[in-house]
Image (cartoon, rainbow, N blue to C red):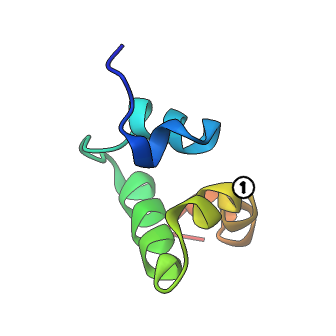
Amino acid sequence: MAEAPTWAANDPVMARYFHNEWGRPVHGEAGVFERLCLEVFQSGLSWLTILKKREAFRAAFSGFDPEA
């Protein structure tokens, strides 16, 4: 596994995001809707804050189901 850059290495949430999601394409309607919601709410906040609140967003947006 590649070494995480400084911005991701200092926090396990960011390191997990870097190794599993960062720079990878998003597939499916729910995946795209999730990324869109997280990106929109990130405005003015750190990405770490959004990642730590991801489960709360998932609950608020019905599991990121666009139809719901």
Horizontally, residue 10 falls left or right of residue 8, namely right
Tell me the element at label 1.
helix
**Label 1 crowd bin: few (<14), some (14–19), many (20+), radius 10 Å:** few
| Residue 17: % across, % down | 48, 41
Type of amino acid under label 1: Glu
Q: Residue at x 42, y 62 (%)?
A: 35
Between 2 and 29, the residue placed more toward the observer is 2
Is the N terminus in the top left, top right, bottom left or bottom right quadrant? top left
Indicate the quadrant containing the C terminus: top left, top right, bottom left or bottom right. Answer: bottom right
The outermost residue toward the top is 1
Query: Residue 33, how many percent across, how many down?
Result: 42, 65
- Choose between 42 and 38: the one closer to the eye: 42
In the image, taking residue 33 as reference, residue 64 lies left or right, namely: right
- Residue for point 64% across, 57% down: 63
Residue 43 position, x and y percent, is 46, 84
**Residue 65 placement: quadrant:** bottom right
Label 1: which residue? Answer: 55
Name the residue located 24 percent from the left edge and 44 percent from the top edge. Answer: 25
Does 67 sit above or below residue 41?
above
Q: Is residue 43 above or below residue 67?
A: below
Please state the total of marks drawn on the protein image.
1
Furthest residue toward bottom: 44
Q: Quadrant of residue 18?
A: top left
Left-right relation of 35 to 56: left
